[in-house]
Amino acid sequence: DWSRVTPGRLATADCDGNIHVWNATHPVAPNDIVAKYGKKKMQHDPWGNSSFTVKPTYSAHGDNLDNPSVEDLQWSPTEATVLASAECGGYVRIYDIRCPNKAMISNKVHASGADVNVIGWNRLVGNLLASGGDDGSFSVWDLRSFQTPDPSVAPKPLARFQSHRSPITSLEWHPTDESMIAVSDDHGTYVYDLSIEEDDPDRAGKSEGEDGAEVEGEIPPQLLFVHSGSEMTKEVRWHPQIPSCVATTSLSGFSVFIPSNL
């Protein structure tokens, strides 16, 4: 994942649980980017440098040493040194590269041990992080309460949806709406608006399990739109300039659409 705070900084990970941070040998200043692509042209190309220094920052650790694969990485949208990882065994970890060799926060968010496939950091509300699992559930976490006093007790999500029947393959927050998120699994693409609440109080009480999570199989009222027809969708992304335009990749090809109710 490329950092949006520090130009030229990249984080990569592998199936052995190693995380590396890449930094451009000659850092690119934001003013250089503006000058290159703005009205005033530069004499040199700020991206002409292809040299990077690579630092092995983290290695496999914790309770999932038998299967330490890192499935996804996301830099914080506001902090230059903070990144989050989605890992096998149900773990989500928060790192600060100023403190190498250990995670600042580590939580097993899936008691079943299902892999966390993807994570998405909300660019508009920096304390919100979404995660999608191999068990078909996706959750939204408040990082202000993500660290629990007892490490053996998992934090409670702000919301958890378990209506999917296949693993979550991708998710991304809307670039201009802090409560909207697009999620994909093998069967389709789904748009949720987390600001919507259940109208019927009696139904709301029945649709939640003992841990406050959505009961498996229930269609949540937050689900606004479903795009079907693609085979094994793997990526979903919002267009950064066209409002509410969504693009997906799948085994059957590309899809670009705007949900009819947005």
Image (cartoon, rainbow, N blue to C red):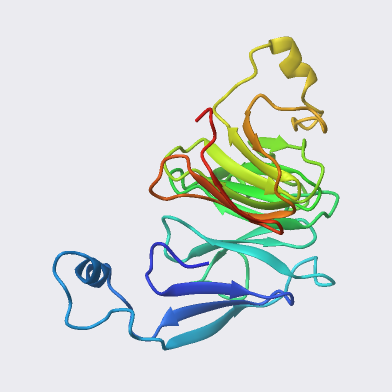
Taking depth in this image into account, of 43 and 25 the one nearest to the observer is 43
Quarter of the image for residue 39 reads bottom left
Q: Residue at x 56, y 41 (%)?
A: 181
Q: Position of residue 57 (x, y in %)?
A: 57, 78
Taking depth in this image into account, of 58 and 20 the one nearest to the observer is 20
For residue 220, above or below residue 19: above
Taking depth in this image into account, of 36 and 121 the one nearest to the observer is 36
> Is residue 148 among the parts visible in the rendering?
no
Q: Residue at x 20, y 64 (%)?
A: 38
Q: Position of residue 40 (x, y in %)?
A: 13, 69
Taking depth in this image into account, of 154 and 4 the one nearest to the observer is 4
For residue 29, above or below residue 229: below
* Direction from residue 4 to residue 96 in the image, left or right: right
* Direction from residue 5 to residue 96 in the image, left or right: right
Q: Position of residue 46 (x, y in %)?
A: 28, 79
> Is residue 55 among the parts visible in the rendering?
yes
